[in-house]
Amino acid sequence: MTRTRIVRVERTDVECSHTVTVRFQDESLARPGQFAMVWIPGLDEVPMSFSYIGDLKGVTVHNVGEATAALHDASRGDKLGIRGPFGRDYRIEGESILFVSGGTGAASLMPALEVAVGSGIGSTIVIGAKTASELIFVDRAISLGADVRISTDDGSKEYKGFASDLAMQVLQEGSFDRVLTCGPERMMKTVVTACLEKGIPVQVSLERFMRCGMGICDSCSFGGLHVCVDGPVFDGKDIIEIEDFGVFRRSADGSKEVIP
């Protein structure tokens, strides 16, 4: 659905000090892992993964710039423009899936976790953040009945270390036939590398600067692919050899920059 639909904000939920979820009524058929182009009137249009995919959809926003600050401050009744859903979704199959999220990456994975649990697939999720106060969607994952593992970089809650480190430990403990991951790209590259070494199929959701959402503007070029139409969900085996993965991305002016 490429036409922009005007929706009204129904509510906002504070996930942590810098992250909120904006909920709005929209009857489009989004699948887990897909994204929308969200237009903030008078400011900008930005790509956002769906964190909720029912009729009351949601996008979860980390306040990092002018457009995301406006979404962060949105109130009930405010108008937004929505284009999409766009992109490839997660393939949710198998008997036991490990989900690995860092930071706001949990937003993309939560709809997939809900589908997996609802389908009777054994589901374990690693939710990581820098500190305990920055963890998001932990209660939502617990309420689904998933096996929830927590990591914090500073050790302020449960496992001390990166989500990728805890994921390596969980992979050693259990038997998984699929891994889905979303979060900081360096974290995801570590997870993809480990999974491919173990022969476990892994899917990864990438984030890039996007404008058109339809593979035309080339803003999200990634090793000859376009994240907006060839992704954002990729098979790990298809991107592990791309030199940009985990290293470079394109800025708004098209120049290459190192991923922090």
Image (cartoon, rainbow, N blue to C red):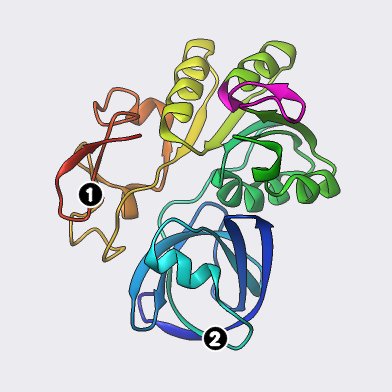
Stretch in magenta: 153-164
Residue 56, compared with residue 77, is above or below; it is: above
Q: Quadrant of the C terminus?
A: top left
Q: Is residue 162 magenta?
A: yes
Q: At 40% from the left edge and 48% from the top edge, which residue is drawn?
A: 232
Residue 90, compared with residue 6, is above or below; it is: above
* Residue type, label 1: Ser
Residue 104, compared with residue 49, is above or below; it is: above
Q: At 48% from the left edge and 57% from the top edge, which residue is drawn?
A: 34
Dot 2, crowdedness within 10 Å: few (<14), some or many (≥20)? some
Q: At 35% from the left edge and 24% from the top edge, which residue is drawn?
A: 240
Q: Which mark is residue 78?
A: 2
Image coordinates for residue 17, horizontal then vertical, percent: 63, 55
Residue nearest the observer in this picture, 216 or 164: 164
Q: Which residue is mark 1?
A: 251
Residue nearest the observer in this picture, 22 or 1: 22
Image coordinates for residue 147, horizontal then vertical, percent: 80, 33
Residue nearest the observer in this picture, 191 or 238: 191
Q: At 73% from the left edge and 31% from the top edge, which residue is drawn?
A: 150
Disc 2 versus disc 1: distance between alpha carbons?
29 Å
- Tell me the quarter of the picture where residue 68 sits: bottom left
Locate residue 35 relative to residue 29 in the image: left or right.
Answer: left
Image coordinates for residue 73, horizontal then vertical, percent: 55, 73
- Disc 1 element: loop
- Disc 2 element: loop
Q: Quadrant of the N terminus?
A: bottom left
Dot 1, crowdedness within 10 Å: few (<14), some or many (≥20)? some
Marked residue nearer the N-terminal end (2 or 1): 2
Disc count in the image? 2
* Residue type, label 2: Asp
Q: Main secondary structure of the magenta part?
A: loop
